[in-house]
Image (tube, rainbow, N blue to C red):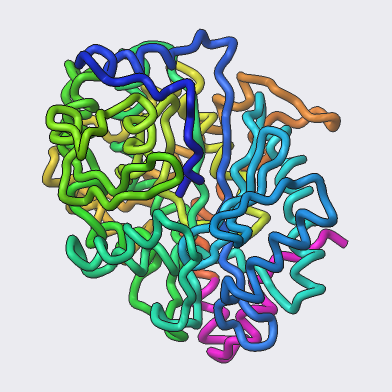
Amino acid sequence: MSQYVANKDAEVPIERYEQLVAYFEQACKPRQRWRIGTEYEKVAVRATDGHAVPFTGGIEEVLRHLAERYAWMPIVEDGRIVALQGDGASVTLEPGGQLELSGQVCESVHCARKEFEQHVKEIVGVGDDLGIAFLGLGMQPISTLQEIEWVPKKRYGIMGPYMLRVGTLGQRMMKQTATVQVNIDYGSERDAMMKMRVGMGIAPLLTAMFANSPICDGRLNGYLSFRGHIWTDTDAARCGLLPFVFNERSGFTDYVEYALDVPMYFLVRDGRWTDMTAFTFRRFWTEGYHGERATLADWDAHLTTLFPEFRMKRYIEARSIDSQSPELMLAAPAMIKGIFYTDDCLLAAWDIVKQWKWEERQTLYHAVHREALRARIRGIEVRELARELVDIAEASLNRQAQLNAAGDSEAVYLEQLRDQVRRGRCPADAIIDKWNGKWDRTATRLVAGSAYRLAA
């Protein structure tokens, strides 16, 4: 979840509906300015027993050490370090202490690789000194929900109790899960809605390819992407697939209408956080609250609290992928850039999924959480569709021809993913095999086998 930062320039009262739509219109960029941004979340555990690292005396110390050793500026809330700010990037915390790098905006995945490798070097070095391991998994594997300390951020103090009212798994989402998210630009309203349409269409395929959360609470949970399943019972008003994007006539106003009727989480004024969960944004905008009027800064903050599989802000965010091992992390931005930044490849991806009915999409969305690439739709295994999707992304990246010093296109980051998909396997399959095999269902072996390490 994004670190909330008040934007003085956006503290403009919302007088007209058109301002809400203009928020998206003004974000359109010409193709030569399209970039990618990646957000990498990691779960942190004690190296000795695999239990979640508490914020107090653990994750806060990680942030402190990172700030002392590297060029990070601490962000403090009520006297506690809760984030770090760098040059175009930040390190933030999810509610259970999951560490997230919100990377710089990059022209290519090669650029993202340099930043990610530096980040791994930093956190592994600090973690080794503190007895902390960062795991390439999509979920905390050992500690139960109750055993994980809340990060003391005001927004989480509002969100946590609210989750208990709107679903059964929301606090698990907040405290136990980890993902990798990819942000992309759009050129026009039509382009934005096409990307949202394709994104929602292929979301189950992305979940299946990258499924990586089969273990939690110290045992197998019966899912390949339990992280994905958790979102299905977190908060129906703000999560899942959005049906309106599949209407070819949909536009920015449809997303505005959706966002207006989702309950708010909070209102921030002069450092004071107010619980607004009884108000939709539409109600706040039309009625106000204790003399406060809705501003564009409030609208911006509200949009960060919506969690559909693909989310639209001043960019589009792909949210369907479990956090990965370092070897597969960069396959996520490579897949998204390949599919979404070449027009005919975007259309080719849409061709794979465009014929499905809404009910079929919903059924598949739920099925891939348990079965991943073995799920079926219309008698076809998802592995077959995923193979085609990887081929599309690979062809696109080769044509984009953004090369590294060795002359490789960004398709190089898809090699391991391509090999796994062709064998019909997702990362969770390997985790389960090891858990039942050489790891002997022990936490220490799981940590040793899935922890981030420095390259030899």
- The x and y percentages for residue 252 are 26, 19
At x 55%, y 25%, the residue is 396
> Where 435 sits versus 431, above or below?
below
At x 46%, y 62%, the residue is 95
Q: Would you say residue 441 sits in the magenta stretch?
A: yes
Determine which quarter of the picture holds residue 309: top left
Residue stretch in magenta: 431-456
Residue occupying the far front of the picture: 291
At x 52%, y 37%, the residue is 335
> Where 63 sits versus 444, above or below?
above
Q: Nearer the viewer, residue 113 or 297?
A: 297
- The x and y percentages for residue 326 are 67, 56
Determine which quarter of the picture holds residue 415: top right
- The x and y percentages for residue 45 are 61, 76
Q: Nearer the viewer, residue 113 or 312?
A: 312
At x 69%, y 81%, the residue is 47
Q: Nearer the viewer, residue 100 or 356?
A: 100
What is the number of callouts on the image?
0
Left or right: 444, with 339 as reference point: right
- The x and y percentages for residue 39 are 56, 45
User: For the C terminus, which image quadrant?
Assistant: bottom right
Left or right: 25, with 111 as reference point: left
Q: Would you say residue 18 sits in the magenta stretch?
A: no
Determine which quarter of the picture holds residue 233: bottom left
> Where 51 sits versus 328, above or below?
below
Residue 240 visible = no
Residue 406 visible = yes
